[in-house]
Image: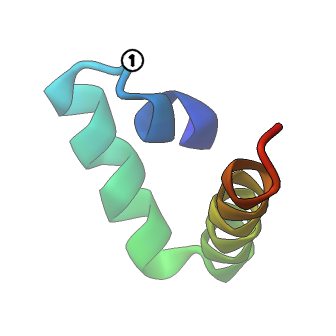
Amino acid sequence: MISQIQDGHMPLHQRLRVRLHLIWCEACTQFERQVRFLRVMMRRYGQ
């Protein structure tokens, strides 16, 4: 779901549910940060 949010392929109500989940779930929050970091690095290196 994290990737779908970052890709913009998720309806608003589902995005809100995931964002609310991220408020209290440290493991998923960390995963979201890692995915975001990897996306930035991939763009930076032209992949």
Q: What x and y, as percent, mark residue 17?
A: 31, 44
16 vs 5, nearest the viewer: 5
Give the color scheme: rainbow, by chain, secondary structure or one colour. rainbow
Tell me the kind of residue under disc 1: His
Give the left or right position of residue 29, taking residue 12 as reference: right
When the figure is inspected, residue 8 is found, relative to residue 20, above or below; the finding is above
- State which quadrant residue 37 falls in: bottom right
Above or below 1: residue 27: below
Which residue is under mark 1?
9
Position of 5 with respect to 12 (left or right) is: right
Q: Residue at 83% of width from left, 37% of height from top? A: 47
Q: Is residue 36 left or right of residue 22?
A: right
**Residue that appears at 68% across and 50% down:** 43
| Quadrant for the N terminus in the image | top right
Residue visible at 47% across and 78% down? 24
Question: Residue 46 sits in which quadrant?
Answer: top right
Q: Secondary structure at mark 1?
A: loop
Percent of width and height locating residue 9: 39, 17
Q: Position of residue 40 (x, y in %)?
A: 65, 61
Number of numbered tags placed on the structure image: 1
Q: Residues within 10 Å of mark 1 (few under 14, many from 20)?
A: few
**Can you say whether 41 is above or below 47 in the image?**
below
Q: Position of residue 36 (x, y in %)?
A: 63, 61
Q: In this orientation, which residue lies closer to the viewer: 47 or 39?
A: 47
**Residue at the spot x=30%, y=29% of the render?**
14
Does residue 27 sit above or below 46 in this rendering?
below
